[in-house]
Amino acid sequence: MSEFDTVIHGGRVVTASDVFDADIGITNGRIAAIAEKIAGGDRRIDAGGKLVMPGGIEAHAHIAQESSSGLMSADDYYSGSVSAAFGGNSSFIPFAAQHRGQSIADVIATYDGRAAPNSVLDYSYHLIISDPSVSVLEELPGVFARGITSFKVFMTYDLMNIGDGGMLDILTVAKTHGALTMVHAENNDMVKWMNKRFAAAGLTAPKYHAVSRPELAEEEAINRAVSLAKLVDAALFIVHVSTAGGAAIVQREKLAGTKLFAETCPQYLALTRNDLDRPGMEGAKFICSPPVRDVATQTALWRHVQSGTFESVSSDHAPYRFDASGKFANGTDAPYPKIANGMPGIAMRLPYLFSEGVGKGRITLQQFVALSSSNAAKTFGMAKKGTIAPGFDADIAIWDPEMRRTATLADQHDNMDYTPFEGMEIEGWPLLTMNRGDVIVENGELKAERGRGRFVARNPVDLTGKPGYRAKEFDPAQNFGAEIAP
Ligand SMILES: [Zn+2]
């Protein structure tokens, strides 16, 4: 028996700060040693000529989740985690979604039942709240105590939109407990008004989805969400920023010290509204909200990726098959508002970001690690994940930076019947994924057992370096002495 269960040797190690040649010794699922040369190891993995990076942390994925209209996503915790692992991820944080009237205890129990027996990767949940009633708000402290330290709320979709007052209530409770509120920011009434106009004109083809949700609808909602969070000085995370204007608001507010975090997604860097204008109903494959935009937006979003506006590039994996179980649940010629919203991408997030980012000189290897793993670990409080250092979980992905692949459905290993990335030329591919020292995927083969993944209890959000905003209306010196706390 060696001192180490596994030694990864001969590779080039990348963290969010450094690139260096070293061996890694792993014991009991943790990184135990990093040195120029490490002998021994019950198993030795040759990483010569390869990159050894922290396994990705996918912070935005819809897995075994019903949409508000009751449609189940195509991937469960098994296929979703397997697909994530093939894409270089060692853990993920899908959503546990409350539907109106449901107690939070019931929501968590439901998702525990879906995740624990099935996930091959470590996982946590963001709790989606669609009904911030008094009894729901009273349940939230118990959720924090379990280590679920992030929520998501919606400003759009009639069955999810909680209104500005609901958001203020949730932001305030979240702040008390050190939780992070995530928001889908689109102006619901602008979108509904546009939909009415298009319907009246008989314009119902998939392509009109792309123009039914204006850039201004996102920009307005981001600005409003930030204002609501600032009023109560609470932390806010803007998910899937799809517009240059929205990203500019995030950048400006970060500079001002607002307690703000944000992400964008590969589809907003890779696709445009022209993809929704493919023949027949093909465009339905590219329907997601907010919609993909245009080339100018892609250029602007890359600049924001490069300059730190976004903590992460996340997939927003929302898998609905191109059949009656998914996209066409309302018929094969359904008008665009009745076509399921969302696209898959959990296995392509990192290969795409590596190829287009690192491969094309847009970002450094260290930025790739930050955007794919380290920042998510810090933002969402996964204390033992997101880097390669002694004492951390051995969550590692070994990449061949030169492997060329043409993206295909077969490479996704999900339950889907299409990938929006089909045919894209990718350079750089994950060969081996490890979670807590266990090899999950190696050379295109799944090595892990269903249900081996563990729930990860997460820490409160760290707001160091974000001074925040003090609304003067809460200051007794400026509000006629009123003692009113946000
Ligand atoms: Zn999403």
Image (spheres, grey):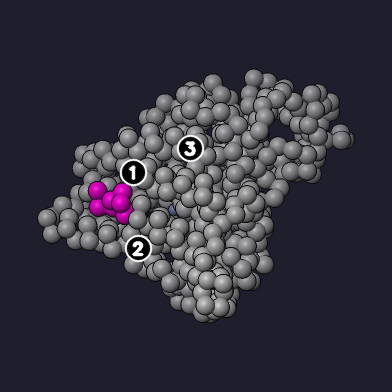
Q: Where on the picture, by quarter, is residue 145?
A: bottom right
The residue closer to the viewer here, 286 or 453, is 286
Residue at 74 percent of width and 38 percent of height: 389
Q: Label 3: which residue?
A: 305
Name the amino acid, label 3.
Answer: Val
Q: Label 2: which residue?
A: 157
Name the amino acid, label 2.
Answer: Tyr
Magenta residue span: 211-218
How many C-alpha atoms fall within 10 Å of the one at disc 1: few (<14), some, or many (≥20)?
many
Q: Secondary structure at mark 3?
A: helix
468 up-or-down from 106: above or below = above
Residue at 45 percent of width and 71 percent of height: 166
The residue closer to the viewer here, 187 or 329, is 187
Residue 197 in the image, given as x and y percentages of width and height: 16, 58
Residue 22 in the image, given as x and y percentages of width and height: 74, 25
244 up-or-down from 111: above or below = above
Q: Nearer the viewer, mark 3 or mark 1?
A: 3
